[in-house]
Amino acid sequence: MLELIDETIIKVRFSEVDSVGFVWHGNYVKYLEDGRESWGEKFGFSYMDMYKNNFVSPIVKIDIDYKSPLKHDDTAKIITKYIYSKAAKLEFSYTIINEKTHKIVAQATSTQVFIDLSENLFLTDPEFVENWKKKYYL
Amino acid sequence: MLELIDETIIKVRFSEVDSVGFVWHGNYVKYLEDGRESWGEKFGFSYMDMYKNNFVSPIVKIDIDYKSPLKHDDTAKIITKYIYSKAAKLEFSYTIINEKTHKIVAQATSTQVFIDLSENLFLTDPEFVENWKKKYYL
Amino acid sequence: MLELIDETIIKVRFSEVDSVGFVWHGNYVKYLEDGRESWGEKFGFSYMDMYKNNFVSPIVKIDIDYKSPLKHDDTAKIITKYIYSKAAKLEFSYTIINEKTHKIVAQATSTQVFIDLSENLFLTDPEFVENWKKKYYL
Amino acid sequence: MLELIDETIIKVRFSEVDSVGFVWHGNYVKYLEDGRESWGEKFGFSYMDMYKNNFVSPIVKIDIDYKSPLKHDDTAKIITKYIYSKAAKLEFSYTIINEKTHKIVAQATSTQVFIDLSENLFLTDPEFVENWKKKYYL
């Protein structure tokens, strides 16, 4: 099976660093979204691609393990990897690496479901997801 | 003319304090929104009141003067005052006071306009705004 | 063993709701911090209590299961429960309940460690944590 | 006098768009900081450059005029221009342009002062600022 992986770089913003000098842990959720959007643009499965198909894909689960802090002036690589699922889900694993120290900053996973614009949950893959999977031989 | 004033208290959150030990200046925009919403609930002119009338009221101007920093564990009073305008605008002035030191933390003003849900700008007061003004003898 | 539980209420802010009409999932990390701080103030173990003892307690793990969305104008109860650990960790479980519908909005856990102000990780409980545990017969 | 101008591009994030479909107005403060940091890196006057000189430069005034909304998938150019001041101040003007429509999205100004790490306000330019001004013939 193809590995659908994207890498993108984020730069720590001044406003993201807390009074201890570390990036506040809640900001990593934004970084994961940055990773997921960069992945989505690469593989034709971004928020806007879904929206054009009249679907949204809310997060139903997120797990983050923080390994070492990010600080002022740091840049980090977000490696976003698609995890294949037979179920009507969208799953990713993430590794965030400090670009200076090459240390692992965090590891995370997320799970999304598919709902249409009337908030109906889809228990099987919507057609556009089926087509997308075929395109990538999944 | 009636003075339409609201006071509400906010508590500084850990995540709002930057690496210098001050509340990051961008967070004050949230505090102003907290003040405006508290005012709106008191005087029947909240975001939801407008939305039920099929209007939204985007901010078109915001000015903030920062006088003294807020820090960890501080609470602050936000005094939100309606500024009457003949034009189809919603204007407020804000004073933020540190509850411990009684110092002025910031002074601000904001201006909003009225658009309907199709993004049409209203150059005169929408009917629900006219009615609201009458109710308060404005 | 005593159950150390706190309940606090949060109100959804306009700026927290995304373009789908749901509270953006990243904002729940703030809600958990609100719950944890409210718990800390009740039981003498807030961010500031730690800081006065020259410790900070960074998050090393966070898991959130999203069950049903929060929307505009919703208020929610955050139930924060201390999970006893022999290790030098601070663990909590959280349940977020929609105050209107009484539905479970999210369930979450978090883990923190203790570091001193020179960023040294403590592998056994610092003295102030030992004393705190004794106070609550833990 | 030299014109010290920087241009940088930002991309609207999913989490920055509110329930009306517009970027929430508070997020522009982050965009201005992105512009200012990009300017600072270009001209050797970033947050970290100041910090290495034992100074921080808190915002004391910010004014934003919102001209047209940013929406999902938009990118914008932030043009940040240094405004010379004899006083011990750091002033910028900003123009934000929608990259698709070339419309002006917002115009803003900001003012910063200089304080040392003990929170002493400087009423005349600190030495590193004087040296920086000489370097650019200001």
Image (cartoon, coloured by chain):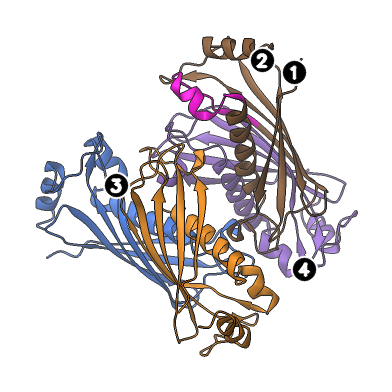
Chain colours: A orange, B purple, C blue, D brown
Residue that numbered label 4 is attached to: B54
Magenta residues span D43-61
Upstream in the sequence, badge 2 or badge 1? 1
The three-letter amino acid code for the residue at tag 2 is Tyr
The three-letter amino acid code for the residue at tag 4 is Asn
- Closest to the camera, between mark 1 and mark 4, is 1
x, y percentage for residue D1? 76, 14
Q: Is residue D58 magenta?
A: yes
Residue that numbered label 1 is attached to: D2
Residues at marks 2 and 1, CA–CA distance in whole angstroms? 7 Å
Q: Is residue D26 visible?
A: no
x, y percentage for residue D61? 64, 29
Residue that numbered label 3 is attached to: C46
Crowding at dot 3, Cα within 10 Å, few <14 / some 14-19 / many 20+, comes out as some
Q: Is residue B68 left or right of residue B81?
A: left
Residue C92, above or below A133: above
Residues at marks 3 and 4, CA–CA distance in whole angstroms? 43 Å
B123 vs D16, nearest the viewer: D16
Q: Do labels 1 and 3 share a chain?
A: no
- Closest to the camera, between mark 1 and mark 3, is 1
**Chain of the residue that carries numbered disc 2 in the rendered image:** D
Q: Residue at the far bottom: name it.
A: A124
The three-letter amino acid code for the residue at tag 3 is Ser
